[in-house]
Amino acid sequence: MWRPSGTIDETYEQNIAIVRTRRHWGTLIIALSALFLLPIWGSYYLVSLINNLSITIIAVLGLQIVTGYCGQTSFGQAAFMGVGAFASCVLVMKGGFSFWLAMPVAGLISGVCGLVGGAPSLRIKGLYLAVATFAIHFLIMWLIFHLDFLGGPRGLSVTPPKIGSFYFDTEERMFYIIITVMLLMTYGARNIVRTRIGRAFVAVRDNDLAAQVMGYNIFYYKMLSFFIACFYAGVAGSLWAHLIKVVYAEQFTLMNSIYYIGMVIVGGLGSIPGVFFGVLFIRIIDELMIFASPVLSKTFPWMGQAPAAALSLTTFGAVIALFLILEPRGLAHRWEIIKASTRLYPFAR
Amino acid sequence: MVAVSVVLVYKSTHVVSLAHGQIMAFGALILYFAFVVINLPFVLAVGVALVCAVVIGWLIERFAMRPLIGESELTAFLNTFAVYLMMDGLFQLSCKGSTFSFFHLLPHDMFSVFEVPFPITQLVSFGISILVFVGLALFFQYTKMGLEMRATAEDHQLAQCTGISVQRIFSSIWGISGLVAAIAGIALAMVIGITPFLPYIVIKGLVVALVGGLESMPGAILGGLILGVLENVSAGYLDPFLGGGVKEVAAYVLVLFILLIKPYGLFGLRRIERI
């Protein structure tokens, strides 16, 4: 890891610190306070956009761990998010849990489902596993749709979280919960991937045979990565449920899983900051398409009234293809290059 | 038949393609535009659609897949996925969420040789598929290019050494598979019409190919039959107990089981791996 010249680690605590210098701390504090004060200075649109982004980021962080670090492609992330959302609804509305307990428990339930979903990775890998997770996605969504106590096509509604008599019932109020959880989960992910577990994941990804020879129980680590990923998805789903306050099966489509995979690819496999880049990049393109679509449909009448959905699909596909061909290591890699070149500026480009 | 085109590409290029669902849909769509909108004669319209499909297949190979030669299978798969999404957007744009159907557009006297105990169009589609299978088998067995393709499928580097242009084979295999996919699309569109959901059939095609084994053409055909029978039988027997909709998931349950028990499909080549 690069650090500014003159910064020398003297203790173990300094060596393992994530935030290294005073300037880092300053930037972090300013950025965080700007973020937390956002409902005051930002518009409603911005707040709800960031809510949405943060939930996506949590889900994609999980996917990054299973796909980017452990190398097991999973197309089931949206389904596990659905599991988390429905679990949380049932726990709060029928089990009498409070939101604060229901969220982690929903994450755990989703994680356990993920263990079942990850079981095929015992026998198959790569492409075959990707198709198996397709199948798992459809199975889970079918179950959610057809189990009676989950409300079928109408779904479930849920009450907003509360402390005492204070309800987190608006976008601005949920914002604080979502942002806090997102930051905590990011911190967690950042730490998971650089501990023993994370290194084991990378070993399994890079060469499973070698990892096994070195004494890693690769099935255990594969299952663990699925568990962690689905825990993240479950928490994201739970937040989503309490933000929207009504959940139904159509909210968690295969398309969402594909978007998550796309975000991981664009951001860069095997990088936590990459998740942020990827989610932002894809979402910005989507928003641009929504703004551009009225103009486009006016200039090209054959496109019809609302080409936004179709166009964003096309651009999304094009972006993924371009990234796979031109920059397979994603935006995070590009970012590292930019950082290194600014640090070395007068001496090297 | 979609499965056959997936297998076709996989066999010789080791790429699993989702893009064929789109080639299929576009084949049907172009036929619709040529036949109904521009009012070409039916045979000519089919010709136009097939040529376009071959060109689409070739373009995908040239611009999307060729830069990725040498990358892992999964990367290539994701890339065909990206192509799939791109074309999906275009497809949605051009059909604007509505359904076109061919049912009454096809001149009925063309098929009146068969009297009607069951839907004529399905019989025709079935006949077309059989013709295509036989044609493919003959092509691979008896032509020089077919031989070259089989050689490429065995080993890319060895084929290159013997003077076969592997790149040319790759593009022609994509062209041929595009052709097969388009025929499949047209046959399918005759039965169910052109809907915005037409391309999604390819996911089922992929399942079929996996069940049969990705390397095996007979496997793909058999897998298709197994899946068709299983879907309808399971829907018939299990729907009353499980409250409907079993048909949609039967395919996925099947592929999960097959993958767990025989990871390389019923007729696939078994690769020996220890983990």
Image (tube, grey):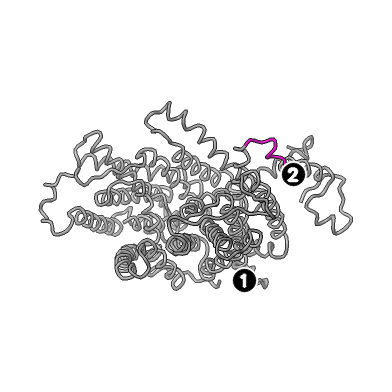
Which secondary structure lies at badge 1? helix
Three-letter code for the amino acid on which mark 1 is drawn: Tyr
To which chain does the residue with label 2 belong? A
Front label number (1 vs 2): 2
What crowding class fits label 2: few (fewer than 14 Cα within 10 Å), some (14-19), or many (20 or more)? some
The x, y position of residue B231, in whole percent, is 32, 65
Which secondary structure lies at badge 2? helix
Residue B219 placement, left or right of A319: left
In this orientation, which residue lies closer to the viewer: A329 or A116?
A: A116
Q: Residue furthest right?
A: A10
In this orientation, which residue lies closer to the viewer: A258 or A85?
A: A85
Part of the protein shown in magenta:
A37-43
Using the image, tell me which numbered label, if any, was put on residue A220.
1
Residue B69 visible in rendering? no
Res B237 quadrant in image: bottom left
Q: Which residue is mark 2?
A: A32
